[in-house]
Image (cartoon, grey):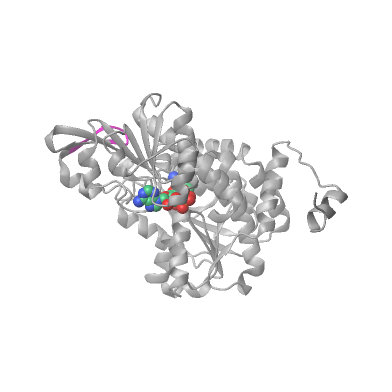
């Protein structure tokens, strides 16, 4: 049985040897109150609330449920150990249940120190038998020690969100590389880092870029990040968006979704970009494209979502107006140059949960949300389950694919196979009760000929 103890940082620990084999676990992802698993979470007593929220999310994840039912019968992942470094949310819990239903053993840690939902982490350990190492607000050292715990489980597959786990594995824990068959990566920033690793020939196994599946970025990044970022901002500020000026840095998949939501709520939206094509698209979509220097004195709310660093920096803070609010929804907390803001400030204080007030030279106040970490996960619940359903269906099916084909793939970044993308779209449409047309034989033939014109 799990031995519970108080850790120095106030977290409740469920302690067992971290050996990947030989301890009980929940069958088919169903609840098992007495599952004894290793892990490190804040408080196991939060499990009941976490379980209710996980079940609520599951009701909105029909595609993943269908995959889980098949996995439970076919056990395509039998014997596979998966180290997953993902945001520990209700949707991730349902992905972990699906992988375990397929016969895998999942070792989960958070992919951001502020994004863990402590009740979900507790439920994963006590009710679903998933080894979970994640505590909301964990410090830098604990964050990395949790990643190491998952690596020490000797995974065959890594599942990353931002590439931190893969980086530790390729630098400080190389001895565990020999067990790894392949991996998956969830987000744009992680894919960028992996491509850099592959280009430098240091990537030691194939990785599938989940982010690049159409059924991921077209929906998760656009609609998920768009809605949940505004949700995070509103939960911590309760600001009125209508009539305000919102500056969005980056018009990628996330930025497009965010701009649509902010505009729909009545804001004047300014967009900043470095890519001329994206800038042109934003202008033609009806936004004002400006440089950040032009935007700085105008914005009431600034949100960065670029995957780049120091997008908001000293010169911009100096030009901002009294009371400006700055937030980030990009993967890392480097998009806002917080050290520069600290240097400019006479002092800072927390004025609401996830809101820090900085007194900038001369007494002007600037409000930083969620320590500059992804605000939709820090202050809200992240993407709605309905959209994570598709992203995580891609994850589950890609792991199944890697189990079969991983050995034949080169040590590079690979796309999600087209048939998986279409299968996820087909299952989602089916769950929504939507039928689409099938081409007639004549249409089929017409689309394949070149001789029929006007
Ligand atoms: N918050 C979330 O839940 C969530 C979800 C998905 C992705 N992400 C993260 O959000 C970020 C963006 O993801 P995406 O899918 O939109 O990526 P993307 O590559 O489609 O878009 C990023 C855009 O930012 C632009 N950009 C880069 N540097 C810039 C700068 N200095 N100023 C202005 N624009 C700049 C790029 O030209 C590009 O158009 C990534 O870090 C990704 O990992 C977060």
Confirm whether residue 108 shows in the render. Answer: yes
Q: Is residue 394 left or right of residue 377?
A: right
Residue 117 place in picture, x, y as percent? 44, 42
Q: Which residues fall within the magenta stretch?
A: 348-355
User: Is residue 165 part of the magenta span, yes or no?
Assistant: no
Confirm whether residue 88 shows in the render. Answer: no
Q: Is residue 200 left or right of residue 322?
A: right
**Residue in the foreground of this view, choosing between 432 and 6:** 432
Residue 283 place in picture, x, y as percent? 45, 40
Residue at x-position 38% and y-position 51%: 274
Compared to residue 139, the image places residue 379 above or below, namely: above
Kindly give the residue lying farthest to the front in the view shown: 454
**Residue in the foreground of this view, choosing between 350 and 336:** 336
Q: Main secondary structure of the magenta part?
A: strand
Q: Is residue 392 left or right of residue 84?
A: right
Residue 344 place in picture, x, y as percent? 16, 44
Circle count: 0
Residue 434 place in picture, x, y as percent? 73, 37
Residue at x-position 35% and y-position 30%: 245
User: Is residue 349 part of the magenta span, yes or no?
Assistant: yes
Residue at x-position 79% and y-position 58%: 450
């Amino acid at each position: 049985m799990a031995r519970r103890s108080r850790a120095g940082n106030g977290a409740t620990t469920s302690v067992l040897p971290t050996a990947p084999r030989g301890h009980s676990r929940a069958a088919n992802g169903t609840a098992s109150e007495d599952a004894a698993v290793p892990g490190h979470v804040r408080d196991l007593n939060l499990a009941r609330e976490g379980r209710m929220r996980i079940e609520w999310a599951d009701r909105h994840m029909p595609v993943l449920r269908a995959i889980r039912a098949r996995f439970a019968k076919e056990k395509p992942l039998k014997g596979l150990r998966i180290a997953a470094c993902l945001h520990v949310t209700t949707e991730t819990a349902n992905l972990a249940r699906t992988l375990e239903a397929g016969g895998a053993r999942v070792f989960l840690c958070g992919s951001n120190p502020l994004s863990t939902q402590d009740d979900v982490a507790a439920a994963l350990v006590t009710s679903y038998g998933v080894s979970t190492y994640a505590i909301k607000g964990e410090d830098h050292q604990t964050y990395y020690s949790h990643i190491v715990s998952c690596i020490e489980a000797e995974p065959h597959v890594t599942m990353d969100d931002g590439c931190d786990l893969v980086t530790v594995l390729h630098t400080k824990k190389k001895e565990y590389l020999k067990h790894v068959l392949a991996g998956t990566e969830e987000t744009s920033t992680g894919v960028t880092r992996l491509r850099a690793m592959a280009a430098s020939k240091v990537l030691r196994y194939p990785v599938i870029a989940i982010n690049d599946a159409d059924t991921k970025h077209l929906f998760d990044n656009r609609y998920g990040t768009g809605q949940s970022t505004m949700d995070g901002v509103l939960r911590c500020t309760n600001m009125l968006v209508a009539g305000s000026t919102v500056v969005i840095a980056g018009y990628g998949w996330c930025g497009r979704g965010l701009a649509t939501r902010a505009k729909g709520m009545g804001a004047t939206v300014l967009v900043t970009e470095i890519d001329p094509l994206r800038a042109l698209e934003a202008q033609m979509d009806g936004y004002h494209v400006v440089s950040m220097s032009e935007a700085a004195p105008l914005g009431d709310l600034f949100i960065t979502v670029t995957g780049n660093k120091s997008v908001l920096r000293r010169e911009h803070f100096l030009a901002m107006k009294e009371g400006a609010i700055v937030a980030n929804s990009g993967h890392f907390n480097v998009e806002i140059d917080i050290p520069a803001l600290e240097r400019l400030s006479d002092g800072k204080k927390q004025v609401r949960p996830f809101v820090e007030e900085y007194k900038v030279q001369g007494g002007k106040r600037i409000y930083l949300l969620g320590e500059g970490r992804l605000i939709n996960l820090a202050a809200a619940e992240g993407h709605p389950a309905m959209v994570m359903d598709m992203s995580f269906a891609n994850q589950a099916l890609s792991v199944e694919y890697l189990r079969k084909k991983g050995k034949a793939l080169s040590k590079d970044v690979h796309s999600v196979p087209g048939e998986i993308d279409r299968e996820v779209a087909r299952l989602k449409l089916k769950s929504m009760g939507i039928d689409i047309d099938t081409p007639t034989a004549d249409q089929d033939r017409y689309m394949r000929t070149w001789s029929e014109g006007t």
